[in-house]
Image (tube, rainbow, N blue to C red):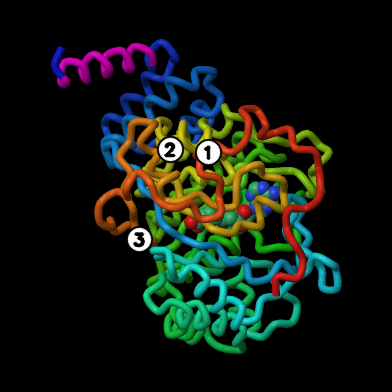
Amino acid sequence: MNATAHAHLDESLATRLIAKAGLADIERKVRAGERLSFEDGVKLYESPHLAAVGLLAHRVRTARHGRKTYFNINQHVNYTNICIYSCKFCAFAAKEGEERAYLMTPAIVEQKVKEQLHRPVTEVHMVAGIHPTMPYEYYLDVVRAAKRGRPDIHVKAFTMVEIEHMLNISGKSEDEVFADLREAGLGSCPGGGAEVLVDRVHKAVFREKTSPDRWLATARKVQQHGFKMNATMLYGHIERTDERVTHFMKLRALQDECGGFMAFIPLAFWPYHTDLENYGHVTTGHLDLRSIAVARLMLDNFPHVKAYWIMLTQESAQTALSFGANDIDGTVTEEKITHDAGTTEPQALSEAQLAHLIREAGYEPVQRTTVYEEIGAEPAAVMPPIGAPAAPRTEPAGARRRPAAGPRAAEAGNG
Ligand code: V47
């Protein structure tokens, strides 16, 4: 059988499965390039036929990206964990004076970036808590410090919560703040801090922090000032299906308006050491794959859907590539937010480990910049590990949800 005949066979099987799952109406819309409704989103979340939902999302992914799966060589720098807010889902935040509280000076940020100069890192991802007293200039200095450490690095920094804070404390106009950030070297913004863009969830689990309307308004400002950014959704805690779909609808509307979102990243909630630890909220393999697939189908104007391996686990992230995701994120290097909340994943993966996960799932690894320009050829099969274990899998199967709330992963006094 030739390859074309094989593809036709796959397609007709998929179509039958999707029809048997009662999703023929949605399939027709997807084929016609028609936008899915709120009700379609709920139906896709509630369908018991995960495979059919996944096939629909996989078709859209394949039409857009073929078998390409993007990754980047990046490093995370969480410059402080001191935070005025006490979100119930967060294990990272600390209050000033606590033993585990830390604050990096710009010189430490520069040092952190310089420590990776021997590796081909193209991006530094910087997010942190909202510090009660650090002045506006500190944030600009943190960006400048990263650029001093590695002038050609792309600085992807500051969630909408941090940007809103800077706008509030700067004493400057919106135009001046974005001009300052650009001049300091900011390249783009990550997608964190959105959580679930619904007032009920905001009130229940992150009431002190940026509200859904303010997160969207700040994202609009960021994009209107010419910065690209990502968007996330933190799922697997108290949110309902209809609220997840509402979240997608709000992001889709903003993307129609401004067009500055690059990737959507569903973030799986890790409960350990958080205020929600004892309520039994955990994500599941099903919910992980479903969230990727429904996002791909509902967010028809987002070019990329990212399976962030640290929160999804390597297993789910790899499988997500066949459920709509076309990006597995990066090497990361040093991660605190999810590790404080109990992830069993390592702190970093090498580019060879990422490429292995992608290739083994049947996809083509493509290194990208932060803004999705393709970089060179795929990496050689063997590269030196970067502090992570050499094998792609690092934990026994099933270990994901079992770690007891042991000692915190984060060490105090980083700065
Ligand atoms: O904003 C906090 C979430 C986010 C927990 O834009 C938690 O490319 C799970 O936004 N369990 C930070 N999640 C991470 C983030 C991100 C990561 C990778 C790539 C990009 C990108 C963005 O993590 C926070 C919050 O939404 N978070 N606590 C927790 N216990």
Residues packed near mark 2 inside 10 Å, few (<14), some (14 to 19) or many (20 plus) = many
Q: Is residue 8 located in the magenta-colored stretch of the structure?
A: yes
Q: Mark 2 or mark 1, which has the lower sequence index?
A: 1
Q: Nearer the viewer, residue 313 or 371?
A: 313
Q: Which residue is mark 1?
A: 314
Q: Is residue 236 above or below residue 157?
A: above
Viewer-side label of 3, 1: 1
Any part of residue 252 in sight: yes
Q: Which residue is mark 2?
A: 357
| Identity, as a three-letter code, of the amino acid under mark 1 | Gln
* Point 15% across, 12% down: residue: 1
* Point 65% across, 34% down: residue: 283
| Identity, as a three-letter code, of the amino acid under mark 3 | Thr
Q: Mark 3 or mark 1, which has the lower sequence index?
A: 1
| Identity, as a three-letter code, of the amino acid under mark 2 | Leu
x and y, in percent, of residue 27 in the image: 34, 24
**What's the CA distance linking mark 2 and mark 1?**
8 Å
Q: Is residue 12 above or below residue 398?
A: above
